[in-house]
Structure formats: C-alpha cells, structure tokens
Amino acid sequence: MTKLLAFLSIALFMFTACNVTKSDQQTQNDTTSVDRISKVFDLQGHRGARGFYPENTLPAFLEAVNRGVRTIELDVVVSADSQLVVSHEPFLNHTICLDTAGKAIAEADEKKWNIYQMTMAQVRKCDCGSLGNPNFKEQKKRKVSKPALSIAIRAIEAYVHSRGIRNVYYNIETKSRPEWDSTYHPVPTVFARLLFKELSKLNVLHRTFIQSFDVRTLQAFKKLNPQSKLVLLVSNKLSFEENLQKLGFAPAVYSPHYQLVTPQLIAQAHTRQIQVIPWTVNTQEAADTLKKMGVDGLITDYPGQIK
C-alpha cells in the first residue's frame, strides 16, 4: 500500500507538471469517441473492481484500469464542506467502515455517521478497507479511506497517462432519494451543480456519464448541460415507456438490473437510440446470455474475470 501511495504521489506530480489538460482538438476527439461508444462494448468496473479491492477506493479504480475496463463506475455523496465524496452510501456502512477513532460501528448507529454532516477531513480518518467485505471472498483488504472525487479522478488520469493507456470513461451515480433531501445530501439542483462544476474543472465532463435512480438529479443535470450523457438506473418492474415518462426525456443509457433485461426491452431502447447496460453482472453465464440478447455493455464487480 505504501508503494501504491508513493506511485500515486509521483504520478499526480507528473500529471500536473506535464500539463495534460487537453487541447480543444483533443477534447473534440474525446467527445467524438463518446458519440461512437455504442459501437464498442462498454465493460464497466462496478465501484471500481469491488470483487478484488475495497469498493470505491483508489486501489479498486486502478485495478479496474489494469483489467481493461472501458468505464469506471462509481458513486458520489456530499460532505458538510460541500466536497464530493466517493461513497455508495451517504453514511458509513458498518459492514466495511470503521469510525474516526478506528472503532467498529454498530449497524444501528451507521446512519449517525452521516457524511453530509462530516467534513472531508473527518471522512479521510475513517478506514473503509481493512474490514473487507464478507460478500466478496476474493477481495484484498487494505487500510484506505473514501476519497474525494477530485482526488480519485486525478489519480486515475495520472495512472492512465503515465502508462500510455487510452483514456477511460466515468459513470458516476448520484446517491440521492427524495426522503434524504437536506438531511443526507443537498437538494438535486445543488447536488447536480456541485458535480457539474467539479467534472468541468477536472476536464472529464466529455468522458463522463451521470446515472441515478433519482430522476430529479438527472433532470437537474440536463438543465445545466443539455449535452450530458445521462443514465437512468432501473430496479422497478415498470415498463420501459413508463420509466422514460417519469424521467421526461430519452437518456443516453437505460441501465436496469440484469434480470430485468429482455430482447424486447433491448429492441425498444435501440429503436430510440438508447443503449442498454445492465447491472451488476457477476457470472460469465449471465454475461454471455446478455451479450447474445444484444446489450451494449455490462457493469460487473469482477472486470477482466467477467468479459
């Protein structure tokens, strides 16, 4: 882990020193690549590579890159000081996190560790990798904290650049629910604005998809940037048309639980020029079945192992 952190520090320095901010021509080239993405199968590493390293952490993201993903899938929440934090929950999950004092968190108390009421400095004190995840037996334990989105993306970009690997894409989920507004996260318009500004500053907006189960954040993001690639996450049993009606526009990607995918759904989506990329596909048998149906990509905890 020490060697990894040392590498990241050097890579980040090189990334800054070499001024790898894209020229207008390069940005245009990347934007064109996004427009052609439907012609390339989009393998996405879920929370980086959760099957191999602690979820939503730098080791998981770099492992996903090493395993050849096209897209890194991750989640963001907001801290008390308005920093975007990479985390699946807007609180410390007792299963995988220790508190600021390095102590275990009782399940009944986990929501008291509300990230929206913690500063980024406090979040960094919490180890969310040493416990491991009992649901992923192959996962290597690491003492690591939830990173700020800016730190994570800069580290990934530096790593990719230093190794001469093609640019990766990002698929970022806004973790929001109506009942959580102003308690576990800001209202959708504020959440979307924070994310839009951060991605613009990092110069990766043109390589980023924004996804959510909460249509409100997608609607807010579309108002900020009509050209954004937006992804509707789906876990309900409403029809394709009913879900699109709730959203109010055609997203770039329709992303249902993999068991909800049918050939008919794919045909409906493709008729509307919408990609279908299901989650979370963790067996090769399921992946092969979905590919035969014609999905445009898949999200997996085991990138490289699941192809």
Image (cartoon, grey):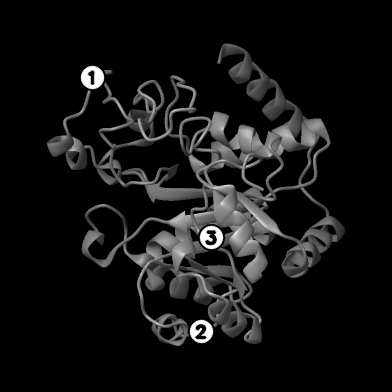
Residue identified by numbered label 1:
103
Q: Position of residue 299 (x, y in %)?
A: 56, 53
Q: Real-space Cα distance between discs 1 and 3?
A: 35 Å
Between discs 1 and 3, the one toward the N terminus: 1
Residue drawn where x is 70% and y is 48% of the image: 168
Above/below status of 215 relative to 99: below
Label drawn at residue 196: 3
Q: Real-space Cα distance between discs 3 and 2?
A: 19 Å
Choose between 10 and 284: the one closer to the eye.
284
Q: Amino acid at mark 3?
A: Phe
| SS type, badge 2 | loop
Q: Residues within 10 Å of mark 3 (few under 14, many from 20)?
A: some
Residue drawn where x is 64% and y is 24% of the image: 8
Q: Quadrant of the N terminus?
A: top right
Residue identified by numbered label 2:
249
| SS type, badge 3 | helix
Q: Position of residue 234 (x, y in %)?
A: 42, 68
Between discs 2 and 1, the one toward the N terminus: 1
Q: Position of residue 289 (x, y in %)?
A: 60, 61
Q: Quadrant of residue 271?
A: bottom right
Q: Amino acid at mark 2?
A: Phe
